[in-house]
Image: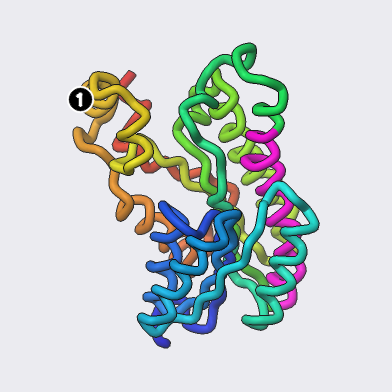
Amino acid sequence: MTGRFAGKNAFITGGAIGFGRAFARALSAEGAGVVLADVDAETAQATAAELNSAGAKAVAIECDVADEDQVDAAVATAVREFGGIDILINNAGRHLLKYNQPFGVLSRTDLRGLFDVNVIGVVNCTLACRDSMRSRGGGVVLNISSMAGYMSMTPYGVSKLAVRGLTVAFAAELAVDRIRVNAIAPGLMNTENALAELPDELIDNIVRERQLVHRLGTMDDVVATMLFLCSQESSFITGETLKVSGGFPLNV
């Protein structure tokens, strides 16, 4: 296939649905092979089948990013199937409304589960992909943070603040291997999960009073940013978290 990412392979965590699936569709349309790593093996297989039927090269691998052994095995399978990894998108994460409650409300089990996926998962996948990227002359790691990481008063927000910190730390640590590391911090998006969880009056307040661009963000807004940060067009950018939030929280 031809395109900006022809000859490149992307390992996408949480690739079965949502942003992960949208990232896979966009990258494969631009020529990349895509690995969909997800705990939901059945849905990941369905997404891979959809991409393959459209002429892409996609494979689904069942993987819990919080489990170091599963991550190592998934990356080894991806390298065997595709020959190597050039792009890692750390998209898998826990983001239910319950994680936006105070620390004292959640059980320690819930808190560990959140940080194991949202934080340790990024560490596991980044370190697992490092050798393959280095052997191919470098690569790109893209982490998915959140605007909640700039207002980190809840467990979810703190986990996404940690993702921003990991982005800076890994950008420094992996620079010697010519691996760039950046992140996207989406704001309020027009996704099924966000609209189902948040009260209408809160959504309207954010869009009308707290954003500078008075509309909901879309999947396409985040996908376009992903394509930029994963491409050579951003070859002089590393260690950055790019807000895709309509100007929120500037207008506060």
The residue positioned farthest toward the front in the image shown: 42
Residue at x 22%, y 35% (from the top left corner): 213
Q: Measuring from the top left, give residue 238's x and y in whole percent.
A: 57, 53
Specify whether 99 is left or right of 131: left
Task: Give the colour scheme of this rendering.
Answer: rainbow
Q: Measuring from the top left, give residue 248's x and y in whole percent.
A: 34, 30
Q: Measuring from the top left, give residue 176's x and y in whole percent.
A: 75, 62
Give residue 194's quadrant in the image: top left
Residue at x 27%, y 29% (from the top left corner): 211
- Give the residue pinned by disc 1: 208
Kind of residue indicated by mark 1: Arg
Residue at x 33%, y 33% (from the top left corner): 196
**Does residue 204 show up magenta in the picture?**
no
Q: Is residue 128 above or below residue 192?
A: below
The residue positioned farthest toward the right in the image shown: 69
Q: Measuring from the top left, give residue 161's x and y in whole percent.
A: 58, 32
* Residue 185 visible to the viewer: yes
**Dot 1 lies on which element?**
helix
Q: Read off the magenta span.
A: 113-135
Give residue 166's quadrant in the image: top right
- Crowd band around label 1 with a 10 angstrom C-alpha radius: few (<14), some (14–19), many (20+): some
The residue positioned farthest toward the top in the image shown: 104
* Residue 182 visible to the viewer: no
> Which quadrant of the figure contains the N terminus?
bottom left
Specify whether 139 is left or right of 224: right
